[in-house]
Image (spheres, rainbow, N blue to C red):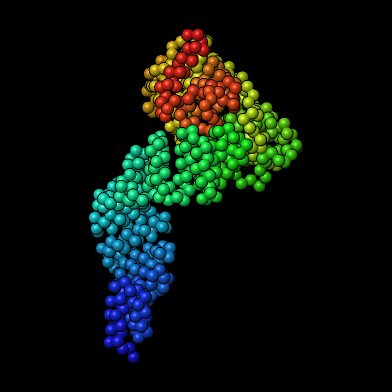
Amino acid sequence: MIDSVQATKKFEQALACHQQGQLAQAQALYEEVLAIDPNHVDALHLSGVAAAQTGDHRKAVDLIGKAIAIEPANAAFHFNRGVALNELKEFEAAAASFDNAIAIKPGYFEACINRGNALSELNLFDEAVTSFDNAIAIKPDFAEAYFNRGNALKKLGKFDAAVASFDNAVAIKPDFAEAYFNQGNILQELKDFDAAAASYEKAIAIKPDYHEAFANRGNALLELKQLEAALDSYDKAIAIKPDYHEVYSNRGVLLMELFELDAALDSFDRAIAIKPDYHEARLHKSLALLFGGNFKSGWELYESRWNVDKFTSPGRNFAQPLWLGCESLDGKTILLHSEQGLGDTIQFCRYAPMVADLGARVIIEAEKSLAGLLEKITGVSEVVTKGSDLPGFDYHCPLMSLPLAFKTELGNIPCPEKYLTSEPGKLAYWNSRLGPKTEPRIGLVWSGSNNNPKLSHRRLPLDSAIRQLPPGFQYVSLQTEVWDEDSSTLESAGNIIHFGDELNDFTDTAALCELMDIVISVDTSVAHLSGALGKPTWVLLAFSPEWRWMLDRDDSPWYPGMRLFRQGKIGDWTGVLEKLKSELLAAYGR
């Protein structure tokens, strides 16, 4: 027979201990209550709550589940069981518990919040947003609801709405450092780097030891080319968290942009020492080595690119073995496959004849726009466009691994005067389109592709260029893609011929390049194409160019007929264009 008086007395003692934070004593007393009355619903529930508070979430779920079986219409029971299930990462069951709590108590905003969190973990972000909206409707001044809603909206790719949700969160709770931080992350994705840096600064002002905010602020400042400020931000992040391997790697990238290669290598080494399998740091280190001309170590380490998450070109899982120069290719068929950008394919297809000289039948797989051009390379037996069925082969090699296979160093780069040729028919067609030549012809490329992540390094405003183009030349646009803000400038420019969509693929562009006296280009695939055709090619480089252009030289070891015009300071094309103008006039005695 149950002694209800004794059970009540024990429960009151347990509750008092619980309220005072004496969880072990409370749990022991709850167990005594349950020994007397196994169906004491409040003891079951609060014993479960205490178990959750001490980290035993499975016990919490079981105990609170027994309470619910006795009193199924208690919203708090369902809520607390859902919280424990969330901790156990059993998110579907947690969401169901919160649903039950809300069904019993429609105004239960805490349940709406936690339901939204569970749904977010299940990647059901639309439903999560609805749950957070319900919480906000019940309690409009609840900052965490706006915060969690912003996180879910980000996952849905609704970045502007997410930023607005974080704005609401900090309006309610001005010291909400995490909201400023998450808002900064979204602003970075929107490429609004000034606003992102400002958000991180607000987070840091609230929470001075917020190492992630210092790190991401550094990333935003790096994008803004405020290099010294970015370096300071990285250093502060490391001072707070000395084992911050990602920041050491990003710091190394920044130091490369400052041409401090030894310091950059040291920073990459520190990242790798902290996390030996941090392949991104290994990749960046390889680029620093190549930048500085240490090709032997650089090419070896460059193979780490295949282990980097979200690398530009995913690795290929062929059944056939990778060839890196060791096995004999005599009588074998090898697939050379392109990777990364079109310019990379053009630069490194120069190795195809060398592979053929080893006795191999050479197949190249590349983008459709390059196929017609690559078919004419000496030693290439077949060109397959990407996405097509592949013929049989014995070995494969990515094009950018060929320098490693051939042990390429600075002194033995294969750099024939030309290794690509134009189609005679295309040459004749474009010659007729241009008409009789009355002035020196200058081919122009002022911008890379709109989807290039390094476009800031590869874009020259057309109106700035036009002002520096001297008269007395016939200028021919080799662009196929023109930015909206350049379109009106191009249309009004009476001294630039533009063919645009008439350039169907690189065989058309190659023919036009052949008909130019000089090709002038920012760092794009056309610069590589012109160089590979053996044409005089002048390349306009940003202050911090890619590794292939190396340091402090106005020529390229990859292309004998190429000249490099480098920015003297970050973002300044004026000096480059002035030098270009004077050199162009000098070249033709004008």
Image x and y of residue 418, in percent: 62, 23
Instruction: Say which residue appears at 47% left-offset and 45% top-offset.
Output: 248
Q: In the figure, 561 relative to 194: above or below?
A: above
The percent coordinates of residue 131 (x first, y second) are 32, 57
Q: Is residue 510 above or below residue 261?
A: above
Tell me residue 126's x, y (percent): 36, 53
Counting the numbered discs, the total is 0
Identify the residue at horizontal 73%, vertical 38% (top origin): 329
Foreground pick, 154 / 29 = 29
For the N terminus, the image quarter is bottom left
Residue 117 visible in the shown view: yes
**In the image, farthest residue toward the right:** 331
Q: Is residue 348 left or right of residue 132?
A: right
Please state which of residues 84 and 158 is positioned toward the viewer in this rendering. 84
- 352, 502: nearer the viewer: 352
Horizontal arrangement in the rendering, residue 90 relative to residue 371 (left or right) = left
**Frontmost residue, 272 versus 69:** 272
* Visible residue check, residue 345: no
Instruction: From the viewer's perspective, tell me whether residue 393 is left or right of residue 514.
Output: right
Furthest-bottom residue in view?
1
Q: Is residue 160 left or right of residue 391?
A: left
The percent position of residue 48, horizontal first and vertical second, equals 36, 73
Q: Residue at x 72, y 35 (%)?
A: 360
